[in-house]
Image (cartoon, rainbow, N blue to C red):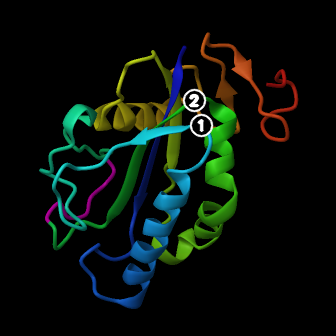
Amino acid sequence: MPRLALYTFGVLKSPLADPGPLTRELYDTGEAVYRKIGQHPGYLAHAEPADAHRGVLFGADWGAWGEFAVPAWYGKGRTSETTALAATLSLWTDLRPAFDAVYTGLHRAALNRRHDWFERTGHPSHVVWWVSDGVIPTWQDGVSRLEHLHDHGSAPHAFTFHHSFAPEGTPTRLNGIGPTGDRAR
């Protein structure tokens, strides 16, 4: 049975190492959100470095999730002192549980504050796609699909929750979101 991969990416207004209140607030909020999402029905797993410290993304051991990668448009630092990004990579059982986890509860509250923490880049902030059972998506998969989404729009290869596709590649619609011409799921 196919599973849903979700990659998110955002460019922060200040580096992760910044001791300022907004960065601390982002960390505190992010830790609470991760705990809650990890308990959400339909959640399977997310990429975590084996032994990295807070703010260390590049060069960390991500195991089966592969080497950490970022979209070509990210132009800020890559050291623990200069990295100014937030990225996630996760696996879900289906579209609806992933959508509900992102757009309700603590994560929804964090989304409402995203412009306090993140720059507006003109690029998509998330991409979803289907993977075969047993496949672990890599960071490079997420980057490639996010760039594809930016360049070509939603397609079975890389899509958003609002313009989604079923595992077999046909357009689909979650009840309550997406184009009304698509079939309900």
Sequence-first disc among 1 and 2: 1
Image location (x, y in percent) of residue 53:
18, 65
Give the secondary structure at mark 1: loop
Q: Name the residue under label 2.
A: 93
Say if the magenta span includes residue 68.
no
The residue sitting at 29% across, 49% down in the picture is 48
Q: Helix, strand, or loop for circle 2? A: loop
In percent of width and height, residue 175 lies at 84, 35
Q: Residue 167 carries which label?
A: none
Nearest the viewer among 67 and 13 is: 67
Are the residues at dot 1 and dot 2 in contact (C-beta closer than 8 Å)? yes
The amino acid sitting under disc 2 is Thr
Q: Position of residue 123 (x, y in %)?
A: 49, 50
User: Which residue is located at x 65 percent, y 39 percent?
Assistant: 97
Q: Looking at the image, how many numbered discs can be counted on the residues?
A: 2
Q: Name the residue under label 1.
A: 42
Residue at screen point 54% across, 53% down: 37
Q: Which residues make up the magenta segment? A: 73-79
Residue 134 lies, in percent from the top left, at 38, 18
**Quadrant that contains the N terminus:** top right
The kind of secondary structure the magenta stretch mainly shows is: loop
* Nearest the eye: 76 or 109: 109
80 relative to 99 in the view: left or right: left
**Quadrant in which the C terminus appears:** top right
Q: In this view, does 66 lie above or below 18?
A: above
Q: In this view, does 15 lie to the left or right of 6?
A: left
Q: Is residue 120 left or right of residue 166?
A: left
Label 2 neighbour load within 10 Å: few <14, some 14-19, many 20+? some
